[in-house]
Image (cartoon, rainbow, N blue to C red):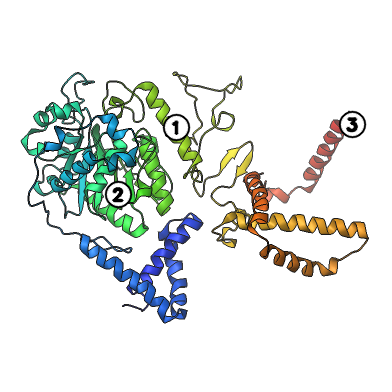
Amino acid sequence: LELGVGGSGFEAMLSEALIAAARIHHKSPARLRRRLRKALSLEWHCMAMHEKMVYAAVALHKRRIAEESGIQVGGETPFRHHSLQFAATRPPLHPPCLQGAPRVKEIYAGGADAAFRHPFVQTLLRVARQRVTFGAPWVLCVRTYGRSGIGEHRGSKKSGIMDTTIKVLKDVGILSSPELALRVHIFVAHCDPHFTSGAYENVLGKRLSDRIIVGVRGADLQVRFIEECFARGQHVVVLDDNIMWLRAWKSGSFQNLQRKPCELNALILQAERAMTNHGANLWGISPTHNEYYMANSPELRISLGLVYGAFFGFFALHEQGLYTRYGQVKDDLERTLRYWDRDRVVLRFARFACKKTHKPGAFQIRKGGISGNLGHVKHLQESSDALGNMARGFARLYIRLPTEKSDQKRCKHTGGLLTRVGGAPKWKPGVSDTGVVFWNESARTQCDRKRMILGYICQGCRSTRASECACIDPLERASFDTFFVESLAAVAAAESLLGVCQKKKSRRISMALMQEWQNMSAEDRANYEALAALGVDAAKYQSPRRRRRKTKHPSAKKNKKTSDAKKHRGYLQACKRTYP
């Protein structure tokens, strides 16, 4: 067992401390690693030998598990075999289980977890794991539904997968390289008419038809199916099937990616290194191809923001808490928030962007994809339900729903609320296109001319110096403050009735109240916690402090008579308003 500073035991303790500190302070682990390593190195020297052995044993256990799956864990760069491997016996494209497939409602009526427990889906997973490529540094998966380009669902002349995403992969050099082409997988749904009719095989040809993997229905469930097909730690890149182009912003304009050497391959490898350095597990590109937005974007963003669902990558972790559960319309937003809740960091390479054939998130009956499964009413209902569940659930500290009073634009002349052509509200720039307002650590939401302090909710964390508090249970201190204030008020009232002054014994009174709080039962504390919760909600909104700007202009103190005359005129105007 390695018991020195920098050994496996110390690194195991450092990784656990980084995760806890990132959750408490809402910061990226990469920003805390240096200071925390210095503090923990001093703590490591003071620890007992048996405590060091516990962390070293945990690190050894993780290493043995990682060796069985072919990767390394614990904050290091994942190790994978750099030679492509396949199963000894690769099953055919159409497995026998598809002939007696159950009805779609029987599989998906019970939700995502029930669907993946279904024997039919488990059979599809076993077949898919034998057909995918493993051992590569990264794999690329295209999820498609109803976009073969053949049939009545064809929306335009260039709506098929061969004219969009597959063409893009050829242009950037992925499919031109025999080694990189073997990393590409095309995931279709078992109930897709374009797959069951053989349209995909006719369009893709013999070479690309061999890369087809039969999965499940739904964009959100397909991503989960893709993740469970690969081993834990595998770097997976997911693409939509209607991408028109993928470009990089260079020298003030969009430019095509290089084919040789493959620039997309370099981007994916760069994302893997960045995820390892920052402690992240999810990355993406710019969610928009607006040139005004791209011109002012940094190369890499690590703050909270949408990881675009048309092109993103992740490390396969196989954790239940990271799987989306609120439908496929807002699955990219939910995925972003779930990974942010776990890692407190997501990566976005803002100098790369893609364009889709249709507006993302909008319903169109003839565009295929998500809209092929849902109607217009069900599409809107699933979107609003997903946003409400996230804003009221696990993501309530990271997003909020916009309101008409504070977030909708108003007419300058009439003051009325502005709406778009379809009747949708026209929001202010602070509202994301996903329909929510992100609560970043540095962002502050304006609401009724008050500043909303977000992320930190106890009294110490709400102060200007957030380092005063590193609480795990924020209501504990707030409830004690409520009890302390009420008790002091009761003591002051008793002193006034008795005519006794006990100012010199204030310290003794404080010590007595602290002792009483420690001996108080959980039932009695619950009342104060309920009052503290109400106080915390009210204390989130604080009036902004108006600070006068100190000017250093030399003419500010040049003419004292002018300033005195202005003060006199202001005094006269105030008198006129008070005594007309």
Vertical position of residue 63 compared to residue 432: above or below: below
Dot 3 surroundings within 10 Å: few (below 14), some, or many (20 or more)? Answer: few
Q: Quadrant of the C terminus?
A: top right
| Quarter residue 564 falls in | top right
Dot 1 surroundings within 10 Å: few (below 14), some, or many (20 or more)? Answer: some
* Residue 198 in picture, x, y percent from top left: 11, 28
Q: Which mark is residue 385?
A: 1
In what element is the residue under mark 3?
Answer: loop
> Decide: marks 3, 2 in contact (CB < 8 A)?
no
* Real-space Cα separation, disc 3 to disc 2, in angstroms: 70 Å
For the point 46% across and 37% down, which residue is it?
389
* Real-space Cα separation, disc 3 to disc 1, in angstroms: 57 Å
> Decide: marks 3, 1 in contact (CB < 8 A)?
no
Q: Which residue is mark 2?
A: 314
* Real-space Cα separation, disc 1 to disc 2, in angstroms: 26 Å
First of labels 1, 2 by sequence position: 2
First of labels 3, 1 by sequence position: 1
